[in-house]
Image (spheres, rainbow, N blue to C red):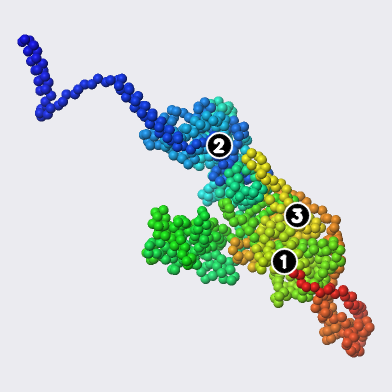
Amino acid sequence: MRSDKNKNKKRSGKHEAANAAAVQADGTAVRKKKKYKLNWKRFLLFIIGLMLIVAVAVGIYVGVIISQAPKINTDEIYNILEQSTVVYDDDGKEIDTVFAEANRSNVEYKDLPENLVNAFIALEDKTFWDHHGFNFIRILGAIKDSFTSGSISGTSTITQQLARNLFLKDSMYDRTMKRKIIEAYYTVIIEKNLSKEEIITAYLNTIYLGYQSYGVQAAAQSYFSRDVNDLTLAQCAALAAIPQSPTANQLVELVNSDDVSKKDKNILKKTSAGTYLANDVSKDRRELCLDLMLEQNLISQKQHDKAYKRSLKKMLKPNYNNTSGVSTYFEDYVIDQVIEDLMEANEWDYDTAWEKVYQGGLRIYSTLDSQAQEVVETEFDNDANYPGIIPRYDGNGNIVTKYGQVSLYAYSNYFDSEGNFTFQSGECVKRKDGGLVIRAGKRLNIYDTQVNGETDYSIEFKNLYTNENGTIYAISGGFINIPQQYKTKNKKGNIIVSADFFNNEDYEDYFKFNDDGTVTITPKAYTLNQKVIQPQSAMTIVENSTGHIKAMVGGRKTSGRRLHNRCINPRQPGSSIKPLGVYSAALQQSAEEAASGQKRHEFKDFKIDEQGADLWGKFMTPSSIVIDEKTTINGKVWPQNSGGGYSGPQTMRSAMVASINTCAVKILLQVGEQYSANNIKKFGITTLETEGGANDLNPAALALGGMTNGVTPLDMASAYTVFPNNGTRRETTSYTKVLDSKGEVLLDKTKTKKHRVLDAGVAWIMADMLKSVVTSGTGGGAAISGVQVGGKTGTTDDEFDIWFDGFTPNYSASLWIGNDQNFQLTSMSSYAASLWGRIMNQIDGAKQGSYKSMPSNVISSGGDYCISGTQGGHKNIKKLVKKVTICTETGYLATPDCPHKKTYEFATYGEDAKHMPKYYCNIHNLDPEKYPIDPDETYIPYEPIKPEDPDDPEDPDKPDKPDKPDKPDNPDKPDEPDNPVEPAA
């Protein structure tokens, strides 16, 4: 009993001791920790459960993301890939690409060189041929990174990049888990449905390679001007080095010429748009690509070393039209023509045809002679080729017309030195609600427009100009950028800009409300159009035999696309219309009349001059006489000749050579205005107005070029092909054929429609006359070495427009120089002729070929050519003016006995002929039978005064034997008078 008690005491004592030990010095009790044994089985079950929960959650999350992801169809990959349309020149060289979003040309796997495929795989994804689309280790690592950094990093396989490029364009730069999951999902589908060859082909057709090039074919053309299957190993490696950073690594870049040293070794080409440089930023990566290919036994050491040594600059041959910094007049024109022809051929609407061109991967084989185009652009850039201008200014420094109307406002009258536009008093009013009223009819123009089918109001600046070191630049206005929803228009036509616009933070810097109550528009709020140097120019070159447009440059020192193309916008032609409306019309009409059996043309006296219906001959031919003399039409002395004055008798040839206005009008009247107009239309001039109150059925338009609308350089170049073509004209075209992306022919214009304009003989004679204009007339500056040129100058009133339209055996061309707004040039058409000649002299195609032989119906008569049957009836131009000696006392023809004589010139036609004396003096006449007197006059016998005996006794010298007097002119038997007819309509 004791022992048990003692035991209990011991236990109790230990317990008390333990409790005592658990009391700290400060009296605070500390609870003793209870020891637990880890149950590994339960722990593992917990972890597994947690993982299952996470897996289910992740699965649900991934499933939701995948279920919400847009469905894809790998069979439609190439329908997704919009292809660029490629334009080629007449030698098959690529000159342009057009696209809606991406410059891309798709190729097949068989067209991809092995080195190109290997270069991309070696650098981007060396396990491409072995993996199944993506690397799970990479994805798990990327997911882990997303929890720690909030974004996903790492590299993707080629298949993943393809999935991203094809199906995740809008989110391809989002580094989020959602995008990565969708990308992996799409990758699995792509790997499942496509072969490796199809995957790498699609990838290489989609990858962006800088310089506006999507896919390796577009890049091969852009950088090297060759197809992808012709790339060298070094070029393949150069392309493979780009995708890591396409913009920075692009092999060619266009920079401002002012920012480039002339000694820069990377310069490829300097143009008016800037300087093209070789950009070798990716050299290290290119060399790494070659090292990896060698390491992976894809190339030999010899191939590696050769490509390694190849410099970038030497391997480049860029397409310099691949940036927006150059003008694209021809390219834009050919695209417009293809769209129009697709609409007509397929009965498509505009949008359908546009999509086909900009997204369908067409191949357009154009007619462009690249050498000709480059020569024109180069010469257009040279300011020395242009005359100066003589603007008229008002008191405010604005350029005005001769009637005082402002055509260009001074930039300084609108903007300060920082580009701010401040409203003047009365131009705007601030509303109490915080809005602004912009008043109409002031310095800003207001137009009603349509945007997305709804009415909008465009607030625009008027046409402006700047003067930079004596050079005038025109600015065709600009507009203020106020979104549609903030503008309304009141009954007075004023624009109300709502207060909401000014309260919007996005536009807080657009307007400034100044302390003095004025309102200023800052440069952020408006856009001005491109500054355009004046004077401007345009030139079109057409191949005579085909109608193919070989060059088209619609302006100078301009850049960008969809520019104002002056080649297809009409201007007044001046005298360059004369070969079409006057001279060829006269010869053609006479040829038709003679062929129909007429004995002569019915010449008429319009009572406007001295010549009337005389001297023309039976028909109008190059040797027909036309008198340059004062003409009075509708009570006014008109027209005036250049330089003033009149030159007297001319032939039709010499009148055209000297570009005499009076002669042109007189010939036109004999031809008839309606016939002339019809003839001009046959030449393909589409702008001639023959209907309505204001039309061109008048001498000012048809003979002198003062037309209602004017003519275009394109139409004039085409028209002048008629002369070297012996009377035929081909409709112009800018392309020969268009193929779709599969190589099927969509459009074929290898041969265009042919029109007979003139009789072959008439055209040949006209070509010969036009050659005289260059060899001995106003077009001398157009002459070129080795080839005879024909053509005609043209100058409008006040020297607003100057032209030269002409031809060689192979090419015809029209060149215009003038200002976009009418103000005077410092020169007449000599500048245009000289520039035409300077350009054509450098074009190989312009010097090829030979002129056609003389047609059988052309004969020589009267010292010139004419159509057989039209010859005869012409007077000798040298006998049209006769010198006669007059007795100053009687006014009759002088006899040898008349003591006082004077020689005069009389025309043998018109009023002058009526006043020329036909009889001899009746008072100093020893032999009236020999020198007959006027029957109405009384003969007064004449006794000559005997000379006084000389003081010198020596025999006087014998008097000289008097000259034998001329026989009196017997008046020609007059022609039968023409039947009077009404003036030509």
The secondary element bearing badge 1 is classed as: loop
Q: Report the Cα–Cα distance between label 1 and label 3.
A: 23 Å
- Residue flagged by tag 2: what amino acid is it? Ile
Residue 477 x, y percent position in the rendering: 53, 60
Earlier residue among tags 1 and 3: 1
Q: Residues within 10 Å of mark 2 (few under 14, many from 20)?
A: few
**Image side of residue 396 versus residue 114, left or right:** left
Q: Residue at x 66, y 44 (%)?
A: 746
Q: Which residue is mark 3?
A: 755
Q: Are marks 1 and 2 in contact (CB under 8 Å)?
A: no
- Rendered view: 147 above or below 777: above
The secondary element bearing badge 3 is classed as: strand
**Image side of residue 787 versus residue 423, left or right:** right
Q: Report the Cα–Cα distance between label 1 and label 2.
A: 62 Å
Q: Residue at x 56, y 27 (%)?
A: 298
Q: Residue at x 58, y 49 (%)?
A: 351
Q: Which mark is residue 703?
A: 1
Q: Which residue is mark 2?
A: 77
Q: Depth-wise, is mark 1 or mark 2 nearer the camera?
A: 2
Q: Is residue 833 visible?
A: no
- Rendered view: 477 above or below 947: above
